[in-house]
Image: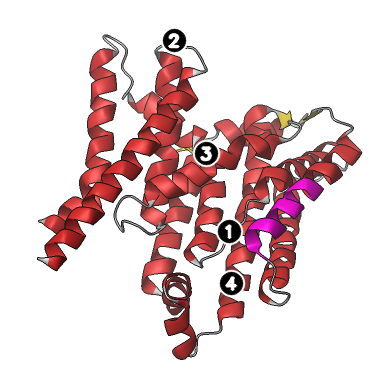
Amino acid sequence: MTGFIQKYAMPLVLIVLVLILQIASGNKNLLSWINIKTIILQASVLGFIALGLSYVMIAGETDISFAGTIGLLSASFTLLITAKGWGYFPALGVVMLIGAFIGLLISLLVTKAGFSGFIISIGFMFMGLGIERSYNEGVTIWLREPSVQKIGTLEIGGVYVFGWILILLFVVSYIVIQKTKFGFDLRIIGENRAAGLEAGINENRIKIIAFILAGMLFGLAGTAEPIRYGGSIVGAGQGYLLPALAACYLGSTMFNPGRVNIAGTFVGSVFLILISNFMQLLSMAYYYTPLVQGIVLIIAVGISVIKNKGAIQQVKV
């Protein structure tokens, strides 16, 4: 029973909070299917970023470069579509390759040169911001290709395409992390580096792959952002820095408490967007959204700490 509480107490708390908000909203149907699929769509960009960040954090590293490179990747995608006349898939492929290359550079500096992933990724964040503004001149580049813009509202089976992509990527990532040798090696390196090295796991190779996967997911986010908002907004990634970190940390309080995990990151990403969505539907002032998100994160961490202390005390007894 204690194990069940440790894993699922936080998701249950979130569900209760959602129901309370629905009851408090009166006649507004916050949990209608239309709104649910909208929330999943709205969570797509944050979800792609948080998933990429999860791979790196599971490996015991940090990569916040996306706060600067998302804008760069978004501008690159928009320019390829608008100025070069490329189709969606060729532009998507190039942008994801750029993201992968950035991830590779960061990983090599971390694994081969011994730099801190946190510091190096901050450096790449600033470089991304600088490069982006050097060719967009600090103004939004609008996406003027109707066929590409329609992708953002395209539905399959009553769910937006980006929603399906988000769900599929998290399901595949969960299987990879939990059921494959790569996932096992990734978790061991992140949780117990010494044990991993003794087991003969190639730490550098694992971390390089994690950073590359993160870069590709950041690239995907960089293509979804302009499609959803109609263009490449200057400094687009900066607004996702804290929410992406919060999604991962909120997710680490559930399912596998104390560790970043794929299922938890998905719930954390969707829940943070859900709060924003509900606050808008309830006509609450915009500044209440980060306030509520912060309170929820603090409560989640508090519950996690209390659960872990209880578990430790039971072990001592």
What's the CA distance linking mark 4 and mark 3?
Answer: 23 Å
Residue for point 78% across, 29% down: 144
| Figure quadrant of the N terminus | bottom left
What's the CA distance linking mark 2 and mark 1?
Answer: 36 Å
Q: Secondary structure at mark 4?
A: helix
Label pair 2/4, CB-CB below 8 angstroms:
no
For disc 2, the neighbor class at 10 Å (few under 14, some 14 to 19, many from 20) is few
Q: Amino acid at mark 2?
A: Ser
Q: Write down the residue under mark 2.
A: 283
Label pair 4/3, CB-CB below 8 angstroms:
no
Number of the label disc, if any, that sits on residue 207: 4
Look at the image and say whether residue 124 sits in the magenta stretch.
Answer: yes
Q: Write down the residue under mark 3.
A: 243
Magenta segment main secondary structure = helix
Q: Amino acid at mark 3?
A: Pro
Residue 305 at x, y percent in the picture: 29, 49
What's the CA distance linking mark 1 and mark 3?
Answer: 15 Å
